[in-house]
Amino acid sequence: MNAFLALIGRDLRLALRQGSAVGTALGFYLVAVAIIPLGLGPDLNLLSRIAPGILWISFLLSAVLSVDALFQEDRDDGSLDALVLGPLPAELIAASKSIAHWVTTCVPLIVVTPLAGLLLNIQAEALPKLLAALLAGTVGVSFVAGAGAALTLGLRKGALLLPLLILPLFTPFLIFGVGAMATSAGAFEQSILLLFALSLFSVAAMPFAAALALRLGLE
Amino acid sequence: MSGLSEPQTVRAPAEDTMFGPALRGWLAFMVLAIGWSVSRYYVGVANLEANGNPGWDTWLWWVPEIMVVVGILGLFILVVSLEASNHSRIANLANPTPFMRMSGEILPRLALVTALLIAAGLAMSFRAPPDDLQGQAARIMFIHVPAAWLSMACYTLTAISSAGYLIWRHPLADVSAKAAVPIGATFTLLALLTGSLWGKPMWGAYWVWDARLTSVLILFFLYLGLIALRQAIDDPGRAGRAAAILSLLGAVNIPIIKFSVNWWNTLHQPASVIRAGGPTIHPALLIPLLVMAFAFTLLFVALHMKAMRAEILRRRCEAMIAIHVRGGGEAANV
Amino acid sequence: MKRGGTFSLARIEPIPGANLALSRTLAVEAVVAEGLDCQRGGRTVVSGISFRVEAGRALALRGPNGSGKTTLLRTIAGYLQPAAGGIEVIRPAACASKPADEGVYHYIGHANGIKPRLSVIENVSFWQGFYSGAADVEAAEDALDAFGLLNLASFSAGHLSQGQARRLGLARLLAARRPVWLLDEPQAALDVASTRLLERAIAAHLASGGLAIVSTHLDLALPDALILELGKPQPAQ
């Protein structure tokens, strides 16, 4: 447990000092959100109707692009070699990395989401629902992305390959995340519960896949 | 090289470290649980939606439970026989020579039967009466539905082969998984294309974001990801295992994706062939459809066998070339 | 807290013995390899390796580039699966209940496993805490001291020279104790004085009942080490 916390602590500290990584994801998120109205036209009614979808899609893209370096740096500087010899099973190493990714990328993105929503004229009553859906769903997003990052570890075109492998697996998150905004009765509760279920499932299952892929990446 | 002193007890090569017994048990449990829940959904919930009653009274209701019991028995027998034969059975299967001999005998006959069946199926398809509502356009169903079935079946085969490769490091399983993916992708593409051609007269557009089309599209992307991942890794052993992990990841996620897409949008007509209350298609259309489905399945088996043979031969060539190159190119010709 | 002055060989105190003694639960009797074939990328790189290294001894792997030293070390560490044969860690009967190779190895490869954004002491403290499960500042500082880095403790590791970075990487050997050291060219980038520090650390490790498998050229002195000569890359059979 201490080793687990030490690893998360180190990753958080690194992300804090390396501010640029978090900043880049945030910048990408805001630019992606800001560029979409340029393609759709400035109609505020249309934008406010599709705002949750735009925010979710930009969020998932930022998450998948930022996850590329999750294991890569540790592999390149030899840390990963030393980590897997430590007391933690590879499953827990992968889990701690995904948790660190959630804290350092998803949480800042969620924090700026109200601002991004403002750009799209999102309705005031939709915003709390969106934030709740993001909080419930993005944990699972980080874990799925972690498995993908482990799978593309050390590949030349890993950064390009990763979205192709991972975005189809994000479909349920996107669907229920945007579904939470539906106005029909019970849609919000149902979607939030399903997002929680997805996150729980990902937390339980993805570290196994990530660990298999990590061992492969060390060969 | 050099023995420095007499070794004492020595551990057997750690070939199973990726899958300890606990993980194998967990995997088996996952497979059974997923299989049970998916089939329970289709047999129970889908039936409830279609007919308004869950269909307790038919034996079909118990199919998921029967599957689980058969699966547990099968796993038990598999484990016992593996222990008894000390992996010799798997080791024999892993040797491609018997496979090459066997498939070489089967393949020409299989190809002949497949060709005849497809010809018969096509003839029956064109002789079938036109659909009451959809007219002649419905005939595309005879291609579309078998292709859609096979797109799923092919992924299932890929996932099972991948599990076999990851658990037993069985090279033939890797060959099978690798060979199945492009075929599956082709059937998926075929299902998408015929679906969209069918959609134009029916829905007025080549593509609608209907639940089933969408989930098949996502399945197609999963296939593309598998192909891309394999191509991105140079070392074939590593590529095989990475693709196996990804295909299992996809297999676990497919029911979830399918459920979510259904939740998202249901425009498509409900499943009409397999359900407890009996098929709702008229027999005049159903029989050609079943013949075509069987013919397509045989086509898939034949293509898969051929692709596996090609892959095995390709690997032999690679091995021979590697020996030749590392030997300094002494033999002038390979 | 000891703070060393500027680094010089004369100022290095003996490595504190209390920190070095291997606890009983960590002890290992021997590492044995039998008929080991190592593969990398589906290709057998070294074959037919057999050795037995008792606690307190070192094994030096020698051989030209491409002879498979790194592959052999990575196979022993468990990163690579052997193509044939096996490796066994023999532990005393007292701790036979533990899995044989759990928590036994330290591996230092060509990369040092240090983070330039963390300070020197944070780097070594992380590995110390990660491997042993409890933060121990003394142990981390002693490890830095043994490699002459204590006076740089609070500086960012990104400022270190190649040789200093190598020493920082090696410091994790002492920060968290493990009985078997697998070192791949550990003296690379080290100057003569630093190499002496490394030799001293290895000697103290062996004296306290540890063992080491080191791939090295002749410039690292390993007194009465077993020597395993790996051959040239094998031509086709």
Image (spheres, rainbow, N blue to C red):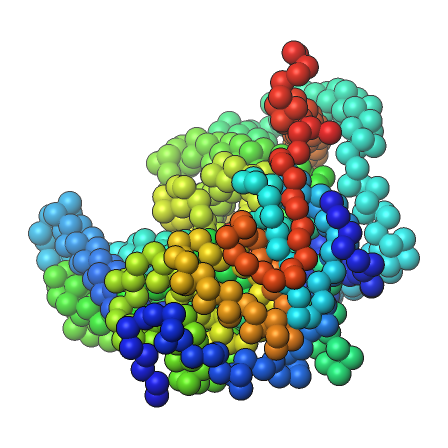
Above or below, comparing residue C146 to residue B209 in the picture:
below
Q: Which residue is found at the position 83% from the left and 32% from the top?
A: B98
Quadrant (top left/top right/bottom left/bottom right) for the N terminus of chain C: bottom left
Position of B129 with respect to A123 (left or right) is right
Q: Is residue B35 above or below residue B139?
A: below
**Extreme-right residue of the structure:** B84
Q: Position of residue C139 (x, y in %)?
A: 45, 82
Q: Residue at x 84, y 42 (%)?
A: B92
Residue nearer the viewer, B184 or A139 = A139
- Residue projecting furthest to the left: A42
Q: Is residue C148 left or right of residue A150?
A: left
* Number of dots carrying numbers: 0
Say left or right for B126 vs A147.
right
Q: Residue at x 36, y 58 (%)?
A: C163
- Between A197 and C229, the one nearer to me in the picture: C229
Q: Quadrant of residue A39?
A: top left
In front: B196, or A173?
A173
Q: Quadrant of the C terminus of chain C?
A: top right
List x then y, in percent, for residue C116.
30, 63
Q: Would you say residue B130 is visible in this rendering? A: yes
Q: Residue at x 66, y 66 (%)?
A: C57
* Residue occupying the far front of the picture: C10
The percent position of residue B212, horizontal first and vertical second, equals 48, 47
> Residue B175 location, x and y as percent?
66, 37
Residue A208 shows in the view: no
